[in-house]
Image (cartoon, rainbow, N blue to C red):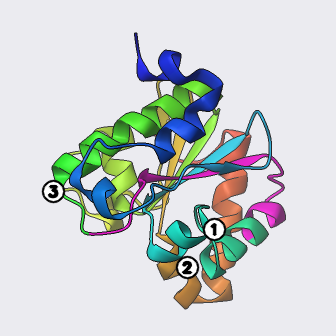
Amino acid sequence: MSIATQFGADLSSAIQLCQRCQLSQNCRPVPFSQNAETPSVVFVAAQADREAEIFGEPLSGRHGELLRKLASQAGISKWHLTYLVKCAGRSTAAIREACATWLDCEFATFRPPTVVSLGLEPALHLLKLPKKTKLVDVVGSIHNQNSFRVGVWYASQRMLTSGKKMDGQFVEFLQKLVAGSGPHD
């Protein structure tokens, strides 16, 4: 039985009880956050931070505010926010692989048509890219992957420090991604 089948609708609770890696010994795993039962877009950041752990919600604070604002400007009203690695702390390839199981369960449960990788680490997992891939080589790209489209963009930290020009570029990127246009691999 798969983890997705095992937990079904209680996936959020299962994530919070996770003990799949050593990070879980000193953290409270951060489940996903969504504003719709059937999201049209899932935003995947690399790893939870301490702020997300404290509030129990992904991309809380300034990162989440900016992301929600820009998604709204792009016309996205149904979204889902999550992390590749659900705990704050130093992650390794083994930890990312252990946590990726939860991300795969989220996709199996919510079946999003569109996914946005915020940074390189989620893109490496989602697109099965070689480890030597650099973000600059894939940022702004759109890929058809299994039953959904994946767009790769900068991490939210970079978006916070880059200003309104990048905000506008991200909104345009989201609109192309959701509309099904743009460069494909």
Residue 170, percent from left and from top: 63, 68
The residue under label 3 is which amino acid type? Lys
* Residue that mark 3 sits on: 132
Of the 4 image quadrants, the one containing the C terminus is top left
Secondary structure under tag 1 reads helix
Q: Give the answer, above or below, for where 25 lies relative to 68.
A: above
Q: Which residues are magenta?
A: 70-89
The residue under label 1 is which amino acid type? Phe
Label disc, if present, on residue 159 of the rendered structure: 2
Q: Residues within 10 Å of mark 3 (few under 14, many from 20)?
A: few
Could you say which is closer to the camera, residue 108 or residue 74? Answer: 108
Q: Are marks 1 and 3 in contact (CB under 8 Å)?
A: no
Furthest residue toward top: 1
The residue drawn where x is 48% and y is 29% is 105
Q: Residues within 10 Å of mark 2 (few under 14, many from 20)?
A: some
Cα–Cα gap, marks 1 and 3: 25 Å
* Residue that mark 1 sits on: 170
Cα–Cα gap, marks 3 and 2: 23 Å
Residue 168, percent from left and from top: 70, 75
Residue 46 figure quarter: bottom left
Q: Residues within 10 Å of mark 1 (few under 14, many from 20)?
A: many
The residue drawn where x is 71% and y is 75% is 65
Q: Quick check: is 38 in the magenta stretch?
A: no
Residue 22 figure quarter: bottom left
Q: Earlier in the sequence, mark 1 or mark 3?
A: 3
